[in-house]
Image (cartoon, rainbow, N blue to C red):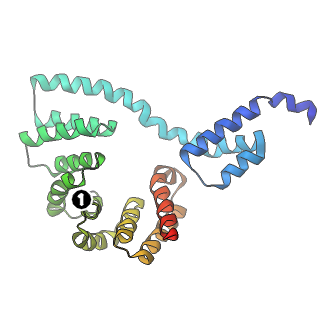
Amino acid sequence: MFGLSHLFYPWGFLVQIFAIVHFVRRRPENYWFFIIFFGGFLGAGVYIVAEVLPDLGLLRGVFQGFGRRSRIQIVETQILDNPSAANYEELGELYKDQGEFAQAREAFNNAIAARSDSIYTFYSRAQSSLGLNDYAGAIPDLERVVAADRKFDYYRAGGLLADAYAKTGQLERAEPLFVEVAQISTTPETLYNYASFLATANRKEEAREWLQKLEAKKRTLPRYMQRRERPWFRKGQALLKVLAAT
């Protein structure tokens, strides 16, 4: 053993540190911490194979961002000659995908000013407003979308509208819409938002029930979707702790 240990020093510690940093940032299942900490180089290596390497697929958005940047410049140049609704819509989508929601909303404002017959544009502007935590600003656009098509985006538009109502204190308007959407949509986002609404309405037992459904949903999802939806599962666990404390 001592004859081989020098081969892993100091690399074993470096691999462990890398694994722990990834664990803190991504927050997978808690048992991985003990595997990394007590398993040494081998435990950290197993963690990297099981959790880090699959996460590399999530980095595609980072590399796509470079392409979006160049495309944004091209579209902005095209708008100088042709300020059409289509060009502004594309620019808005590019900015939204980039996470630059203020610029995205401004582009969608211009698109709607040029043509106001597309609920897709209103939905995209609403998503940009939500990205800015402007729930009140998103409500009129979401209401327009849901009025035109209650099933829009597989009922996600309705779920976002219900959540925006709840976030702005309109609980009586949020509840019937949440009930309708939650009967059909079982996405982690919808499950968490409904549980959060119930907690806000001081219906704690019901909130716990929906958070349990969220946890059950996690177990049934494929691994790649568990990774993608991980932020909602974290929020659910945090809300459960808050409910337990109160």
Asked whether the viewer can see residue 154, the reply is no
Q: Position of residue 5 (x, y in %)?
A: 86, 32
Relative to 50, say whether 12 is above or below.
above
Q: Amino acid at mark 1?
A: Phe
Disc 1 target residue: 152
> How many numbered circles does the render carry?
1
Residue at (7% x, 41% y) in the render = 113
- Position of residue 38 relative to residue 89, above or below, is below
Q: Residue at x 36, y 71 (%)?
A: 198
54 sits left or right of 111 in the view? right
Closer to the camera in the image, 98 or 223 = 98
Where is residue 154 shown, x and y percent of the image?
A: 30, 60
Q: Residue at x 76, y 34 (%)?
A: 12
Whether residue 124 appears in this view of the structure is yes
Q: Quadrant of residue 48?
A: top right
Residue 51, x across and y down, in percent: 61, 45
